[in-house]
Image (spheres, rainbow, N blue to C red):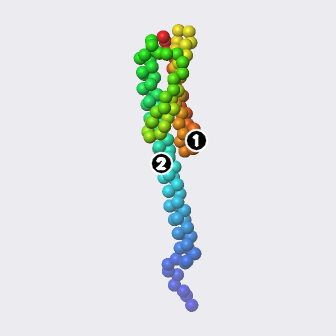
Amino acid sequence: MIRDQRGFTLVETLCALLVLSLAVLLIGQLSQVARSLERQADIQFAVSREANNSLATLQARTRIAEVGVHQRDLHIAGIPVHETERITEEGELLQITLVYAWQEGGRRREQRWDLLQSR
């Protein structure tokens, strides 16, 4: 007796569903990681833009720049960011250091910018 072999067996169907569900879960995880990395890049770009603005302002007022440490709290891209501005004299030069620190995803992030400016 010859049996007609059309269609899929139950085991084949279950295996196909397992592979498909794993693929959907993987795509969901990759999507979350991509969103997280995009958010991180947006924050770093916004902090870089703020640092560039601060450095331009400091360069414009170096004649009256106060040597010392100045701190302020900012909100950049919806996240609280702490800015530390340190100005020290190095002979005829001013060393300007900006440090931006924030918490993201339970981890401390930091950007540091250094500039030497003639007095």
Q: Position of residue 110 (x, y in %)?
A: 55, 33
Q: Residue at x 50, y 35 (%)?
A: 81
> Is 12 on the left-hand or right-hand side of 75?
right
Q: Residue at x 51, y 23 (%)?
A: 70
Q: Residue at x 57, y 38 (%)?
A: 108
Q: Position of residue 100 (x, y in %)?
A: 52, 31
Q: Label 1 amino acid?
A: Arg
Q: Label 2 amino acid?
A: Arg
* Residue labelled with disc 1: 107
Q: Residue at x 53, y 36 (%)?
A: 102
* Residue labelled with disc 2: 35
Q: Is residue 25 visible?
A: yes
Front in this rendered view, residue 1 or 72:
72
Residue 9 lies, with reference to residue 84, above or below; the image says: below
Residue 100 lies, with reference to residue 2, above or below; the image says: above
Residue 46 lies, with reference to residue 64, above or below; the image says: below
Q: Position of residue 14 (x, y in %)?
A: 55, 72
Front in this rendered view, residue 57 or 68:
68
Q: Within 10 Å of the Cα at label 1, are there few (<14), some (14-19), or many (20+) other Cα atoms?
A: few
In this view, the mark in front (2 or 1): 1
> Which secondary structure, mark 1?
strand
Q: CA distance from mark 2 to mark 1?
A: 17 Å
State which quadrant residue 19 falls in: bottom right
Q: Position of residue 49 (x, y in %)?
A: 43, 31
The reply to whether dot 2 and dot 1 touch (C-beta < 8 Å) is no
Report the number of numbered marks: 2
Give the residue at the far top of this rendering: 92
Residue 50 lies, with reference to residue 107, above or below; the image says: above
The tag earlier along the polypeptide, 2 or 1, is: 2
Tell me the quadrant of the picture where the N terminus can be found. bottom right
